[in-house]
Amino acid sequence: MNGKIKKLTWLVTGVVLGFGLSLHYTASAQHSADDPTDLPLKDLRTFSEVFGKIKSDYVDEVPDHKLVKEAIIGMVSGLDPHSAYLDEDAYKELQTGTQGEFGGLGLEVTMEDGFVEVVSPIDDSPASEAHMKSGDMIIKIDETAVKGLSLGDAVKKMRGKVGSSVTLTVLRKSEPKPLVIKLVRAIIKVKSVTMKEIEPGYASFRISQFQERTAFDLAKAFDKFNTDNHQHLKGMILDLRNNPGGLLNSAVGVSAVLLPKDTLVVYTEGRIPDSKMRLTTIPDDYLTENTTDDPIAQLPGFSKKIPVVVLVNGGSASASEIVAGALQDQHRATIMGTRTFGKGSVQTVISLGNDTALKLTTARYFTPNGRSIQAKGIEPDVVLKNQGALDATLGIREADLEGHLANPKAGSTPDQENHGVSESQAGPEEGTVSAKVKGKSTKSEDVEMQDALTYLKQHPLGVKP
């Protein structure tokens, strides 16, 4: 099982084995009409003709490697918004990011309509300190227009020497004119788990993204609270707002902190055998080859029974949605906030052997009850509107991305796909709490957190609405 986990947690896979090799393989396999590896020779001849014309007739000389690289990028980017060819720099950045430290501004970004769009700023980063927001559209980096750049090239321009500055020109829906934001680059140490005691017996556990050791850091933070306060938690808030996701096995590990052993967390379906898995809360499904300890296994039994509220919003994506969906389907937690991003696919990362890689969508994932959240998101049990942390619905969701995968269960019955109370059904006024939460929230900068605390106190046994 660990072999499969290793393949699916790295979010990339390979691209083209080599142009000559592909042609040779097709020539030898073309006798089998049913062979799925057959390549379209007519189309490849057209590609070869275009390649040759560019080489001979284009106004400037273009290196072969640039033409091939751009062809690969175009082929992969046309599949869906999350598949991508990673050059040497981009591949290194991906590996560094999942390990929790890199240099830059601290932005989780995506490409939309040729511009760089902010999914969410990373906590305690130059971007968050400059008050950049989910949904911000970056149109210029210093004096370079973003339009026409690849996402990798744009990210490269935003990164640089620690202490150096970069100026971003940003479009924000709430502002009539572009904003000019100057930031100073820093080493971004992503603190993936932050624990904070809200009141005696109650604590919030903020997960900013799912890295290699996130689940273990959560288990240690849980144990630290009990040790420091000489008491067990009465209730906890798992804060996944604006968490863009991360590693699949990390999401399984976080779920294992709160769910009993052998409980189904997620299952995946794809075309290749390794993409078809059922992942449960057993060590083999969340430990990696580099793991030397397992603090999750050392947690006391009561950790599986503490009342839990999970806070989500439109910036909660991918691995965040796996955790929220698992805890919701297993009736282990109450999900509060707004509808999540809706990324229900898994990307596999495979090295190509030349320090490059391909991030390829290889599977769709499903919650324990068989729900696909692709282009739909997780509907919270208790809806909170326009409060607390900025909701990324001011920006984009999966369903807004061009070329997004269809939801395979779009025709399912409401019982299979709908969970909780939708915003349209809840109907509270702007800036109010859903009627499911009684009483008024304590005045605080983070109103949603206070609403979650109020809910925990009103439901000491973790009863869901």
Image (cartoon, grey):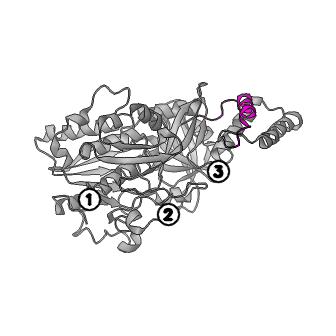
Q: Nearer the viewer, residue 145 or 247?
A: 247
Q: Which residue is mark 2?
A: 410
Residue, far left? 230
Q: Which residue is mark 1?
A: 452
The answer to which image quadrant residue 445 occupies is bottom left
Is 171 placed left or right of 189 in the picture? right
**Quadrant of the image for the C terminus?**
bottom left
- Can residue 143 be seen here? no
Q: Nearer the viewer, residue 103 or 93?
A: 93
**Residue type, label 3:** Gly
Q: Residue at x 33, y 34 (%)?
A: 284
Is 403 placed left or right of 125 in the picture? right
The answer to whether the residue labelled 1 contacts the one labelled 2, judged by CB atoms less than 8 Å apart, is no
Tell me the CA gap for discs 3 and 1.
38 Å
Specify start and end residues of the magenta stretch as a single range.
Answer: 14-33
Is 81 placed left or right of 423 in the picture? right
Q: Nearer the viewer, mark 2 or mark 3?
A: 2
Q: Which residue is mark 3?
A: 114
Local secondary structure at mark 2 = loop
Tell me the CA gap for discs 2 and 3.
29 Å
Sequence-wise first label, 3 or 1: 3
Sequence-wise first label, 2 or 3: 3
- Can residue 348 be seen here? yes
Q: Nearer the viewer, mark 1 or mark 2?
A: 2
Q: Residue at x 54, y 32 (%)?
A: 350
**Quadrant of the image for the N terminus?**
top left
Residue, far right? 57
Q: Residue at x 30, y 60 (%)?
A: 447
